[in-house]
Image (spheres, rainbow, N blue to C red):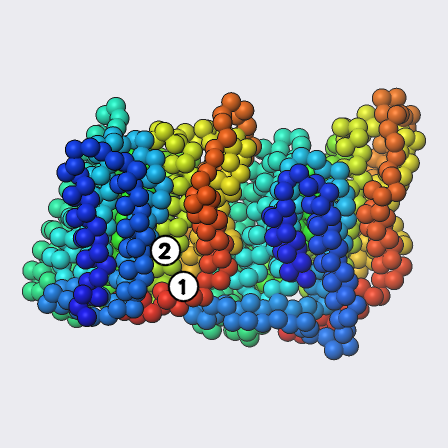
Amino acid sequence: MDIMLFGPELFYLGMALVFFCLTLRRQVQVRLDYQIALALSAVGVLVTGLCLFQQGDLFFKAYRVDLFSQIFKFALALGLFLVLTISHNLAAIEERYQAEFYFFLTTTTIGMMMLVSSVELLTIYVALELSSYSLYILVPLRRGDGIDVEAGIKYLFIGAVSSGFMLFGLSYIFGATGSTYLVDILPKMNQLVNSPIGIIGLLLALAGFFFKLSVFPFHFWAPDVYQGGANQVVTFIATASKAAAVALLLRLAVLGHASGYNFTIALVILSVVSMTLGNLVAIVQKDFKRMLAYSSIAHAGVFLMGVLTITEAGYIGVIYYALAYLVMNFTVFMVLSEVAADGRDLQISELAGLYRRSPLLSMSLILGIFALAGVPPSIGFTGKLLIFTSAMNAGYFWLVVIGAVNGTICLYYYLKVLYAAYFIDDPGLPVITLSLPMRLLNYALAAIIIGFGFCPDRIVELAKAAAKAVL
Amino acid sequence: MLLSPFVGLLVLLCLKNEQKFLIRAVSVVASGISLALSIFTFVAYDKGLGGLQFVEKYEWVQTFGITYFVGVEGLNAPMLLLTGIVIFTGCLTMWELEDRTKEYFIWMMALVTGVFGVFMSYDMFFFFLFYEIAVVPMYILILVWGSTRKEYAAMKLTLYLMAGSGLIIPGILLLYASSGLNTFNMLLLHGANFSPWVQKVAFILLFFGFGVLAAVWPLHTWSPVGHVAAPTAVSMLHAGVLMKLGSFAILRVGMYLLPEGFQYWANLMMILATAGIVYGVFVGLAQTDLKYVIGYSSVSHMGIVCLGLATGTIDGLNGAVFQMFAHGIMTALFFSSVGYIYDRTHTRDIHELGGFSKIMPVASAFFITAALCGAGVPGMASFWAELLVFVAAVQVFPVAGLLAIAALVLGALFALRVVQSTFFNEPNPKFVHFEDVSPFLGIPRMILIGTLLFFGFFPQIMVSMIKSSVVPFLQGM
């Protein structure tokens, strides 16, 4: 029975071992590696799917398996699988490093899976570092002219600093409560949270996840890493890693439940600044990935808006939106990496003529972009609306107004992308042909974006059950 | 009714780009079905019984109290009829389109699905969802198939409307949150007692949010630019139907749910509406581009709708809804005839077209009919609508009412001058060789004229329909 509880992690551990062995070979067999990776990750999705309704505790109750953690594990497995589907052409990574690419992607997935299940401070920290270190290596893996190294170092430094903050905060919490178990900390936080040590400890402890989610003021890495990393790596950072960060924010924010004003006002400020800053700076970007980086900063603000309500409705909204964000952001990145097949950075203007080059990709782009912008009927719209609703219910009228205004601002730069893809024609570029699996993937993503946007009930019910497990 | 454009959309998705005839045929059939259904609901609606009929209701997301709830009553039945007529004629009008035909009709169908949805929804979530679905395709429709400064117009229009949505979302959510009922169902929310503060704040948010789409002065600036840039059928739909979404939403969400808020802001509505009427008339008649003339006349006509709403009396609301209907048909006719002329001559300049009636008598006749209707000539539907509004307005706001009437009378005078200089001067020799409207392409325009005349001679059909809902509506306030 315990095996099933730890099933997904064990599976991915096995997968990591396979790729560790593959990295030791002398001859490189790119195709074979890719096929193994894709097949294993597809099985991984199945395994996590099967373990969706497992429940229990492991490792002296430091590790909890509940619907909440399993949903996010499923999302992570799905994210890994999706990223691998667009890795059939890893032009940006040298061939002899490609097995390492798969290896580190798998280990970072394991780290994140452990992260979403951890309910003990030290476990959380170790799992976080496991997932981060793999990413620190993946970012500079790109074959390039040094921009990748710059990105990698920036990522490492800011990551290390935020880890430092986080450890500092965790030590405050531990010092004040005498326990590292969230279950024990929670009742004691009620008195603590309005004292400086409680608030500072909690906010600093959240810093590690603010970094992952690229919340202001830990957002500086995002544009450079997005631009400097290989497209596939960035896709993983922008989708799966965000979901994991959101999950932990949800778990830890519960500690601030009783705080009332002080704790939430800090989050409100971070949310507003992230949204506004991200959206305003995104307007002037020319590089597609940089623009998406700033849009991710803006989205981090939206996530925070739901988190800071610390109500069931807010958590439902955030869980829903985290899943939605994974799908819609992936859709956009998929288009990006298909268009930039040689692994280069794509300028927005280079999307010109996409309408003619590949109608299917441009349809996916339109759906993904509209979903990110929160235009109905898409999962992005429904998710945003659920979060706004919960924030309004919790009495944050002005926060919702600012969020809605930001919704208008962001539309401008998203529409510029569509404009480039649909209305500027560049006759010199060849037609993009997609393989059959890629075409199916496009249709599937489109169906998910529209279908679950229009009929969100099932997901909402699932998210509701998951939210109950955390609150 | 909601389903038929949607099914049409799905069928279109499956068709190939080369099968142009099939694409057109499918869209015309789909819109024809929705027209037939909207006529059916209009006729089959039991006025004696009143209230909501043809209700469909499903639980959608229980946790957040979202229900799929559509129905028909006296207020929206005319709007549905209007949409049915305009989309059907719009599809016929665009029969000649050659460029990216499939996508064009797909977006049209998406837009129409949204429009029908807004008019029928009684759940705020779906109301807003459909509202956005109706608004967003405009960007693409204008950008790909538009003319004159289309990039600027499309971006301006979209940002304006989205800014409006940015006001609507907090407004709707404020209602949802402060009612404490955990429901988006409007009929249930109607029973909630909102505090005066909520009433005032939410109403003004919703009024300005929806007011952008209704082209309430001074938020109208996107509208003439957008109409000019849009392709013919989109102008028809947009001026004819979409702008009505805005005023309809003010009525349905704003006034219905927030009567006190409405009372508080009624004077502001009246002032803005009157300003819009006067401004639209004068600016419109200084234009030389025919589409700009129509665009600004729309602003002034929408001002009349708004003025009718602001009165808050039975006659006023009757007139406002009637005016929405009449103006929708009339503008569709306007744009449809101008579109025809523009497709042939590639100009809309009044001076260049001079004496056009000698070249294309039928096309000109269509335009002139619309102009007469706009001027409120008796025998046309808009005559009754404007009469009702002005009667109510003079009683409630004497000064504004008289001002508006004066502006309209002057406007009628100028309108006749526009008609005269466009159609009855010496013909421009450049255009002599053009042929007139063929009988087939004349059909959609004839339908529109027929509707205008029919309700001009039998206004009672429409008025009694609207009244069956307006009376309980006002009692509920």
Look at the numbered disc 1 and give the secondary structure of its residue: helix
Count neighbours of disc 1 (C-alpha within 10 A) and say few if under 14, some if 14 to 19, many if 20 or more: some
Q: Residue at x 75, y 71 (%)?
A: B45
Q: In the rendered image of this protein, does residue B401 appear above or below residue A31? A: below
C-alpha separation, residue under disc 2 versus residue under disc 1: 9 Å
Answer with left or right where residue A248 lies relative to residue B188.
left
Amino acid type at circle 1 is Ile
Q: Nearer the viewer, residue B37 or B473?
A: B37
Q: Residue at x 22, y 61 (%)?
A: A7
Q: Nearer the viewer, residue B145 or A112?
A: A112
Q: Residue at x 60, y 64 (%)?
A: B121
What is the number of the mark on residue A394? none
Count neighbours of disc 2 (C-alpha within 10 A) and say few if under 14, some if 14 to 19, many if 20 or more: many
Give the letter of the chain under mark 2.
A
Amino acid type at circle 2 is Leu
Q: Which residue is mark 2?
A: A323
**Which quarter of the picture shows residue A400?**
bottom left
Q: In the rendered image of this protein, does residue A14 appear above or below residue A357? A: below
Q: In the rendered image of this protein, does residue B244 appear above or below residue B335? A: below
* Residue B345 makes an appearance in the image: yes
Is disc 2 in the same subunit as disc 1? Answer: yes
* Quarter containing the N terminus of chain B: bottom right
Q: Which x, y percent locates residue A215?
A: 28, 46
Q: Are marks 2 and 1 in contact (CB under 8 Å)?
A: yes
Q: Which x, y percent locates residue A105?
A: 24, 44
Answer with left or right where residue A105 lies relative to residue B226.
left
What is the number of the mark on residue A459? 1
Q: Which x, y percent locates residue B61?
A: 47, 68
